[in-house]
Image: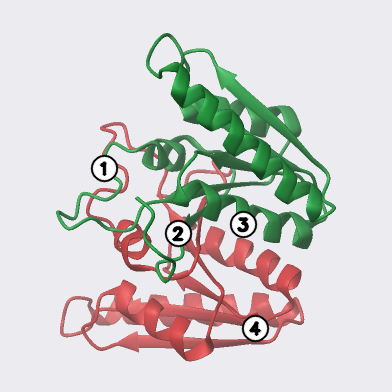
Chain colours: A green, B red
Amino acid sequence: MDIVVGYINSPEGEAAVDQGIHEAKLRGGKMVVVHSMVGGGREDSEDYLRSAEAMARVEERIKAEGLDYCTHEYVRGQQPVDDIMEAVNTHDAELIVIGVRTRSATGKFLRGSNALEILHDATVPVLCVKRDVLETDED
Amino acid sequence: MDIVVGYINSPEGEAAVDQGIHEAKLRGGKMVVVHSMVGGGREDSEDYLRSAEAMARVEERIKAEGLDYCTHEYVRGQQPVDDIMEAVNTHDAELIVIGVRTRSATGKFLRGSNALEILHDATVPVLCVKRDVLETDED
């Protein structure tokens, strides 16, 4: 069965891709990578360029693993949760993989986050992955 | 690799067990079922009896699948997240599976829930599963 990975250009997004590769291998299905940008001027051209480069690197990693995959890059004013659920329905996916941030000093964590929206609305199981806290801090 | 399932006697708990069986088969590891009750008078004797019966049914289901498993029933005043993380560390588990409630009419969902605490503190990926919304409503 296929899986959907919610990708953002961040250490959490990379963690989601790593876990997604693991899950796609276990399940023998396609890895569907969804990259949402809101569009409508919310991001600048530098953001788009950096994201396109990041997605190209993600594709290279998945190809190197020999996995069947496809990508959806959405820039159409939807929230990430809507794009992810559309991909789940299109591919009849059995799993969503997303990156979540580690707890902040203020303990705010998931409040108001895209991750919480996805947990709210998902109709299939959601696998939440953190960046490897042992890695060098990149942000 | 082993997986840890956080079990509570509820439709969400049953959904976590179902998904846990699926994940344990995929991964070929042991299924570690953790059932936390706070103890210290927070639950009454009826609660303990019902939970013991529910756990016995869970064990029968896992046995019927032919899976390697073990159970930990904790009643010692800890929060579920602490019991789950102890089991993760003891078994060097690669995954936690928990049930989460569907969004409430008031949208409160995960706030202050055990699920959110587990998502906060987990050092391994957490798979969040909802009850099958197509099933008859039991609560």
Task: Choose mark 2 or mark 4, whichever is in front.
Answer: 2
Circles 1 and 3 on the same subunit: yes
C-alpha separation, residue under disc 3 versus residue under disc 2: 10 Å
Of the numbered discs 3 and 2, the one sitting upstream in the chain is 3
Q: Amino acid at mark 4?
A: Lys
Q: Amino acid at mark 1?
A: Arg
Q: What is the quadrant of residue A102 in the picture?
A: bottom left
Q: Which mark is residue A18?
A: 3
How far across and down, in percent of the image, does residue A119 sit?
44, 43
The residue shown at (46%, 81%) is: B88
Residue B52 lies, with reference to residue A91, above or below; the image says below
Residue that numbered label 4 is attached to: B30
Q: Which mark is residue A131?
A: 2
C-alpha separation, residue under disc 1 versus residue under disc 4: 33 Å
How far across and down, in percent of the image, does residue A92 sit?
73, 35
Task: Choose mark 1 or mark 3, whichever is in front.
Answer: 3
The residue shown at (55%, 40%) is: A7
Callout 2: residue from which chain?
A: A
Q: Amino acid at mark 3?
A: Asp
Callout 3: residue from which chain?
A: A
Q: What is the quadrant of residue B67 in the picture?
A: bottom right
The foreground one among B73 and B87 is: B87
Callout 1: residue from which chain?
A: A
Q: Residues within 10 Å of mark 2 (few under 14, many from 20)?
A: many
How far across and down, in percent of the image, does residue A82 sit?
51, 25
Label pair 3/4, CB-CB below 8 angstroms: no
